[in-house]
Amino acid sequence: MPTTVRSFRTPDGVTLALDHPEAFSALSLAGTWPVAPGPVGDDLPDHDAATMGRRFALPVPDWSDRAAVAEFAAAGAVILGDDPAAARAKAERIFDRTPGTEPAAMLAP
């Protein structure tokens, strides 16, 4: 019997759906990104180099600056063909409900 799967780990859900399409009636993916870095599978198209270049050329914002974070989200939305106003509003809502801007873990220099 087909099953509905909600995957928060995209590669797992996508791999299962591609390898066993008869087992699924639906697949919901959360937290996916159409231009994620890294290699793609043999059965998927490669990432668009121009889009990747534009997306990763954006300067990283000051994560403690609400306006800068919202603008970063809006600029990314424009590159991906999404609604920048909606992306800006969503980033502002997320920023407003985030308890702090200090990272949970520090990145290596």
Image (cartoon, rainbow, N blue to C red):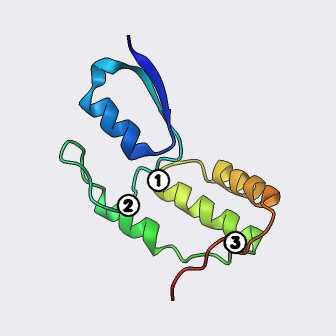
Find residue 17 and name its label. none
Q: Secondary structure at mark 1?
A: helix
Is 7 on the left or on the right of 24, as rendered? right
Rendered location of residue 6, percent (x, y): 51, 32
Q: Amino acid at mark 1?
A: Leu
C-alpha separation, residue under disc 1 versus residue under disc 3: 19 Å
Q: Nearer the viewer, residue 85 or 8?
A: 8
Q: Determine crowd level at label 2: few under 14, some 14-19, many 20+ residues with C-alpha closer than 10 A.
A: some
For the N terminus, the image quarter is: top left
Q: Are marks 2 and 1 in contact (CB under 8 Å)?
A: yes
| Residue on which disc 3 sits | 68
> Identity of the amino acid at label 3?
Ala
Q: Which mark is residue 80?
A: 1
The amino acid beneath tag 2 is Thr
Q: Position of residue 20 (x, y in %)?
A: 27, 26
Q: Earlier in the sequence, mark 3 or mark 2?
A: 2
97 lies above or below 17: below
For the point 81% across and 59% down, the residue is 96
Under circle 3, the secondary element is helix
Image position, residue 71 (x, y; %): 66, 66
Residue 56 lies in quadrant: bottom left
Q: CA distance from mark 2 to mark 1?
A: 7 Å
Instruction: Tell which circle, 2 or 1, labels the residue nearer the N-terminal end.
Output: 2
Q: CA distance from mark 3 to mark 2?
A: 21 Å
Tell me what residue is drawn at x 28 percent, y 32 percent. Answer: 18
Residue occupying image coordinates x 81% and y 63% = 99
- Of mark 1 and mark 3, the one earlier in the sequence is 3
Q: Is residue 45 left or right of residue 105?
A: left
Q: Nearer the viewer, residue 12 or 75?
A: 12
Task: Determine the residue located farthest toward the top in the rendered image.
Answer: 1
Q: Secondary structure at mark 2?
A: helix
Provide the residue designation for mark 2. 51
